[in-house]
Image (cartoon, rainbow, N blue to C red):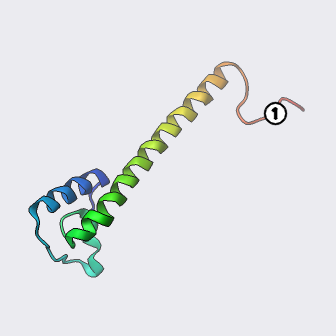
Amino acid sequence: MKVSAEQALENAKKYLEKGINVEGTGFVHLDDWNGNSGHPKWVKNKLIPSLEKAINQGEKLKGKRKDKAKDRAITERRGRPTGRSHHT
């Protein structure tokens, strides 16, 4: 089952609070990235920082897309074509 990065981060934090080591059942432990299994040190030192970084990068991209769309809309209102020269 695939979960969002936010949900996996929440799962990982809850998993660390339990203080247990649950053995992953999936092939090559890919299901550990869901935050419900894995060695506690790996979860703390690798999984949580990786998920936080991915979430932050996603938020930055959303902001850039909004800014770019806003700039494009302003430029089009001014009657200037976007990305093209006025020279013929």
What residue is rendered at 70% in x and 32% in y?
Answer: 82
Counting from the top left corner in percent of width and height, residue 58 is at 42, 48
Q: Residue furthest top?
A: 78
| Up/down of 39 relative to 49, above or below | below
- Residue 25: percent from the left, percent from the top? 18, 78
Specify the quadrant of the image occupied by residue 40. bottom left
For the point 77% across and 35% down, which residue is it? Answer: 84
View extreme (bottom): residue: 27
Q: Amino acid at mark 1?
A: Ser
Which of these two is toward me, 36 or 73?
A: 36
Outermost residue, right side: 88
Q: In this picture, is 36 found above or below 73?
A: below
| Number of numbered tags placed on the structure image | 1
Read off the residue under disc 1.
85
Image coordinates for residue 30, horizontal then vertical, percent: 29, 73
Near-viewer residue (78 or 38): 38
Q: Quadrant of the C terminus?
A: top right
Q: Nearer the viewer, residue 87 or 49?
A: 49
Q: Residue at x 40, y 47 (%)?
A: 56
Report which quarter residue 70 is drawn in. Answer: top right
Q: Is 60 rendered above or below residue 68?
A: below
User: Can you say whether 66 is above or below 9 in the image?
Assistant: above
Secondary structure beneath disc 1? loop
Q: Residue 53, located in which quarter of the rendered image?
A: bottom left
Q: Is residue 83 left or right of residue 23?
A: right
Density class for disc 1 (Cα within 10 Å; few <14, some 14-19, many ≥20) is few
Q: Nearer the viewer, residue 35 or 18?
A: 18
Q: Which quadrant would the N terminus be assigned to in this image? A: bottom left
Measured from the top left, where is residue 85 in percent x and y? 81, 33
Say which residue appears at 26% left-offset and 77% top-offset: 29
Q: Along the horizontal axis of the image, is 39 left or right of 77?
A: left
